[in-house]
Amino acid sequence: MSLTPVVLGLTAALVWGAGDFNGGIASKRTNALSVVIVAHGFSMALLLVFALVLRESFPSTRAWMWGGLAGLVGPAGLVLLYKALAGGKMSVAAPVSGVVGAALPVIFGIFTRGWPSPWVLAGFGLAMVSIWLVSEGGSARFRLADLRLPVLAGLAFGFFFVALHLAGDESVIYPLIAVRIVSISSLSLFAFFSRQPVMVARESWFPVLMSGLLDTLGNAAYAVSAQMGRVDIAAVLGSLYPGVTVWLAWILLKEHVNRQQLVGIAAALAAIVFITI
């Protein structure tokens, strides 16, 4: 297997995890919907600059449509995730959304590309286990109600992975622009009709802009990874992003990371090795 799609999938995980950490920090001070709208607006500006500089070929209507669909489900997942991150421990909300989001592309990849090798399947299993171990955090108290927002966010992310892959068959930047056009429009309309403020608090501007930048880089890395390899491999590797979020929460916010979570991180590293065999 070529290592380039694997490296890009892992890159997506790194920058998505850091982006979600910044989004969660911003959502503690500002409405989560405002965080996503402003971050996506900044992302849109970056993508337009990239499109002009790189002069990528204009894609077909089909690519725009799939990009638009990704633009509907992706932001919904982010809003749900940021609300979960702001309302609870980052080390629980992020990993649960990750394991649910990884499952749908795996099913899609099996139906469209066939079964991957046994080693890759073993890697998928280890990745799911690793995310789950990190998510539990050794807590004896486990309420189903606490999983509602992370699970819904994960379902939205799973559909986003599939739609963005289908949109990226012809180009990378323009489908991401379609994602942003639809996401900004739909979220702005929702904010208007629900009478939610869009203004971001002054102290939240830096994490919001960092979230937009990192989310854009992660989307691009994932799209290219899925183009060059299998969508399920790209999605599973990208879905390891909660490990980055947990690590940053541990280092910067002093959130407790126990032995079970460390085992989960080790399982994630083993999963990467199995997937690359």
Image: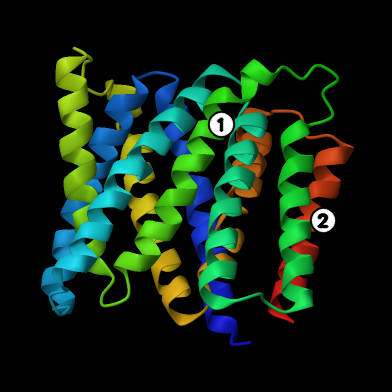
Residue appearing at x 18%, y 12% in the figure: 195
Q: Nearer the viewer, residue 205 or 43?
A: 43
Q: How far across and down, in percent of the image, does residue 81 sit? A: 48, 32
> Who comes first in sequence, dot 2 or dot 1?
1
Image mark for residue 95: none
- Kindly report which numbered mark, 2 or 1, lies closer to the viewer in this rendering: 1
Residue 230 image position (x, y, % from top left)? 53, 75
Relative placement, left or right, of 216 versus 13 is left
**Residue 276 horizontal/vertical position (percent):** 69, 78
Q: Is residue 180 left or right of residue 227?
A: left
Vertical comparison of 178 with 92: above or below: below
- Looking at the picture, how far across and down is residue 141, in whole percent? 81, 16
Query: Which residue is identified by label 2?
Result: 266
Return the residue at label 1: 150
Q: Residues within 10 Å of mark 2 (few under 14, many from 20)?
A: some
Residue name at image x 32 percent, y 70 percent: 168
Q: Are marks 2 and 1 in contact (CB under 8 Å)?
A: no
Q: Examine the rendered structure and indicate whether residue 30 appears above or below residue 234.
A: above
Instruction: Name the foreground residue: 246 vs 222.
Output: 222
Indicate the amino acid at tag 2: Ala
